[in-house]
Amino acid sequence: MLHVLAVDDERPALEELTYLLRQDPRVGRVGCAGDASSALRDLSRMLVDGERLDAVFMDIRMPGLDGLDFTRLLTGFAAPPNVVFVTAHDDCAVTAFELGALDYLLKPVRPERLAESVRRVAGAVERAGPRGGDARDPEDEMIPVELGGRTRLVSRRAVTHVEAQGDYVRLHTADGGYLVRMPLSALTKRWEAAGFIRIHRSTLVASAHITEVRFDGGRAAVQIGDELLQVSRRHTREVRDRLVRKFHHPDAADGGTRGGENGAGENRGGGNGAAGNGGGERR
């Protein structure tokens, strides 16, 4: 069964499109979004939660981010959904297909024509093979963030660390911080394979950006750029086991940075002390 997202800034058009899609027996779930920026946020959340999205049926002319710009941004995703445009304008078809659109429907939408688009989506998904929530680029991932009415894609590689802030997380990069609505626990699970390590209940760090590990009196801290981030007692053992081993063995499976090797080795004795204090977490 297909999982799709309908996007239109006009409520009646969105409701009609959603209704028609739900009548097709090949469609199992239909999500709705009132604009392209909301659709990007929904897509990002679904990827983080491990959900699948097979296609986006969307209008082109919408306030703010339009359908064509949305499709251009999809190139930053490891497994982007198929795009079917549903619009009252016939002057964007060439550009749409150049951007890789699977189909182009004109309003008012005829049920039989929409059924043909769904057939094309089903065929494309079958040819692509399984594309569940684990389909991703092992090297990088792009996260859409909102900046003053604009949508920007932030590379996972550029993220040095992540802080939980209520229902949001703040992605820290060399260029600044970006708020994204998602739980830190879900992001931790998704980015663990990319070398991100939980050092505190509210902090996730990219091991590739760590230049030094310090152990002192049973406590630990990691250096990222100009910031020294404290490791909670609860996570000290894991940090010691993963990072100290990495710094002394740079060819370990999850990579490493040689720059922090001396810093990690200076307090090796303190690391042993920290390992014995893996009790309850203190801020």
Image (cartoon, rainbow, N blue to C red):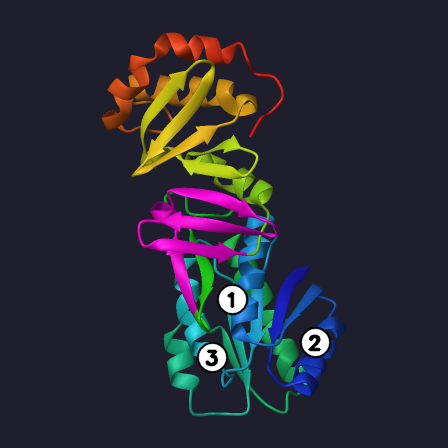
What residue does disc 1 label? 82
Q: Is residue 197 visible?
A: yes
Say if the magenta span includes residue 168: yes
Q: Going from the N terminus, do you reach mark 3 or mark 2 first?
A: 2
The image's mark for residue 66 is: 3
Disc 3 element: loop
Residue underneath mark 2:
18
Label 1 SS: strand
Please identify the quarter of the rendering in which residue 152 is found.
Answer: bottom left
Q: Indicate the position of residue 105 as horizontal and vertical percent values.
A: 55, 84
Residue at x 34%, y 48% (from the top left corner): 158
| Three-letter code for the amino acid on which mark 1 is drawn | Asn
Q: Which percent across, then down, holds residue 261? A: 27, 20
Which secondary structure type mostly characterizes the magenta part of the structure? strand
Give the amino acid type for the residue marked by disc 3 in the picture. Answer: Asp
Which residue is at the front of the view, 45 or 202?
Answer: 202
Of circles 1 and 2, the one toward us is 2
Q: Quadrant of the C terminus?
A: top right
The magenta region covers: 151-180
Task: Classify residue 26 by image quadrant.
Answer: bottom right
Magenta highlight on residue 79: no
